[in-house]
Image (cartoon, rainbow, N blue to C red):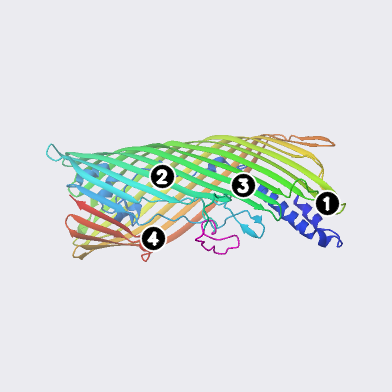
Amino acid sequence: MNMSVFPKFLATSESNCETHMKSRIRFLALAALILCPLALRAQYWSDYVLEKGFESRDYFLRPHRVLTLNLKNLDAGLLGILPEPLSEMSLQPAMLATINGSRFYVDLKGSAEKPKAPKYRVYPLYYYDNAYFAPPYYARPAERKLEPLVSALYVGDVAAKLLPGVKFALAYELIHHQGTFYEYVPYWYYGAYDAFGVRAEADRGFPELEPNLKQDGLDEKTETAHLFDAYLAFKPAKFLALGAKVSRVQTDISGDYVRFNDYDDDNYHYVSRYLNAKSVNAELEQNEVSAGALFTFARRQLGVFAGRVSGEHLQSANDVDSSFYSYEDDVRNDYFSRSRYSHFSASDWKHEGKTNYFGAHGELPMQNDMAFRFRVEHQNSEVDLFNGDAVQDTSFSFYRFRYYPDSLIYEADYGSRFSDDRHGEGAESVSRTDVAIGVVLPVRENSEFMIGLIGEFEESELLMDEDAEIYRSSHQRTPTPWQTPESRIGIEDKTLRLDRTSTTTRFVLPVTLSYYLGRGFTTHVAALKQFLHIETEEVIDIWYRTDSLIVITPSGTRPENPPQRLDRYRATPVRRSETSLHFRLGLSFEPSKRVRLDVGMGASPTDLETWQFAFLVSL
């Protein structure tokens, strides 16, 4: 339907202006209502690649490292630099053999991270009588970078008498969050507000009648991840310790959004019903095996380690959207309208791959009891990418109206159909190198000062091919004053190729101080100066093997069959650099030699919900 038709309805003579003013306003509102859903319905991939819709987790195919609070509260890059044996054994399993006795550690996080809302959001508007509402059709599903709510670690002896020096450890972390599928839902959705924004008052005399469901909805998303580690270490010689670790990660994500509305207006003879339902499910499974050796000579220490992570990340998404609109009834002569719309899409993604990593770390003595500590690690990931998608759309509309310039009644009959079927394959290669050095200086008894440098470098290359077969047709079956009967049939057979490269460089200059205050209290203070630089380039090439169009009108058929072509879409390259300065503060308290309590304060110390708490018990 052509929007340019609207001014023609408004250009009526003064004599019939008052008589038909209400009818024209009703018709214009109805036409806008019909056009909005067709123009603003679900987004299609079209010249975009399906792979862009995959939501990966940052820990996928990454080694799992359990960080204690005093280290996590500062920076994960300090692993192996800041002395912390319970954290270092995640990097170097042989470090477990250097821990005496049995220990039990629990880390409790204060609260889950809240998602950041995008700066710009697009909502289609639907007009109902005198109230507007904005269902979040285009709102981006909430993505959260979550940290473990609970971290638990146990260290013990396998058999102190039979196997002296053989140690084992078990670790578990839980990630869990339940929130909304979309951010944000309109304020009235959960609140007791009517269409005018007025707070509804409670009525204690509510009748016990069978409800006539007029509006319903569901908006939730749940993510749960279980992360397990098992360690084993022993010392075959005084100068040598060996260790191994196996890990398992299991993540399940499910989200549902449902919006149902049934609206009737007897005064205007208007009926509107629609159902919009979306669901997302994802599973992540990965296994890790690693081993290491630790050599100790006097105060010198050198360790090497290596490991492999393998796993797969599956994701699926479904979208169902249907609507029905009618205005007046078919026995009236001047105005009648009815339309139906149906949309269905199903998408699947699969990422499967492995990561090999190796590295070295050590501690070397310096003058004045200072120690030089270092860590070098390299990771290389290879990921196979697969996806598939099917989209089906149908629409039908019929309306009758009186055209005032000629006072004749016209009927318009319109229908359309759309389908998009595609599947893709590709690969992604990621290379990471981490380097960290630090100098640890004893200040006084049980107090240490550390200054260091952390460098992290990551490069990724992604190449993805997606084959797509697209069919679209539309049919205007009856003539109107501004449009003749016409049928349009289009077919596309094309391959889309995504070529993306990305590099990330991060430098951190950390300065930390652990100062013993006396009476079992130790304060942890740190300042971290960070430099971050990101570069990303992305190109999408589209090879059109077939891009044909047939236009059928009463005067004949007009085919359009352009030759094969290659279109290129080059995204604006991303070049972003930023520097920041962060301060961290923590406190440890040892009421006895067997118990230690740790507290880590968030970026905003006054926000108690961001604080973290941990305790360590020596058994």
Disc 4 versus disc 1: nearer the observer: 1
Q: Residue at x 84, y 58 (%)?
A: 12
Q: Which mark is residue 432?
A: 2
Q: Which residue is mark 4?
A: 529
How far apart marks 4 and 3 lie (CA) works out to: 53 Å
Residue 98 image offset from top left, x and y in percent: 20, 46
Q: Secondary structure at mark 3?
A: strand
Q: Amino acid at mark 4?
A: Lys
Q: Amino acid at mark 3?
A: Tyr
Task: State which quadrant residue 119 falls in.
Answer: bottom right
Sooner in the amino-acid sequence: mark 4 or mark 3: 3
Sooner in the amino-acid sequence: mark 2 or mark 4: 2
Disc 2 versus disc 1: nearer the observer: 1
Residue 147 image offset from top left, x and y in percent: 38, 51
How far apart marks 3 and 1 lie (CA) works out to: 30 Å
How far apart marks 2 and 3 lie (CA) works out to: 49 Å
Instruction: Judge whether residue 381 is colored magenta.
Output: no
How far apart marks 2 and 1 lie (CA) works out to: 68 Å
Q: Is residue 133 left or right of residue 385?
A: right
Sooner in the amino-acid sequence: mark 2 or mark 1: 1
Q: Secondary structure at mark 1?
A: strand
Q: Which residue is mark 1?
A: 403
Q: Residue at x 54, y 44 (%)?
A: 278
Task: State which quadrant residue 558 falls in.
Answer: top right
* Majority SS type along the magenta span: loop
Sooner in the amino-acid sequence: mark 3 or mark 1: 3
Task: In the rendered view, tell whether residue 2 sits above or below residue 162.
Answer: below
**Which region shows up in magenta?**
187-205
Q: Amino acid at mark 1?
A: Tyr
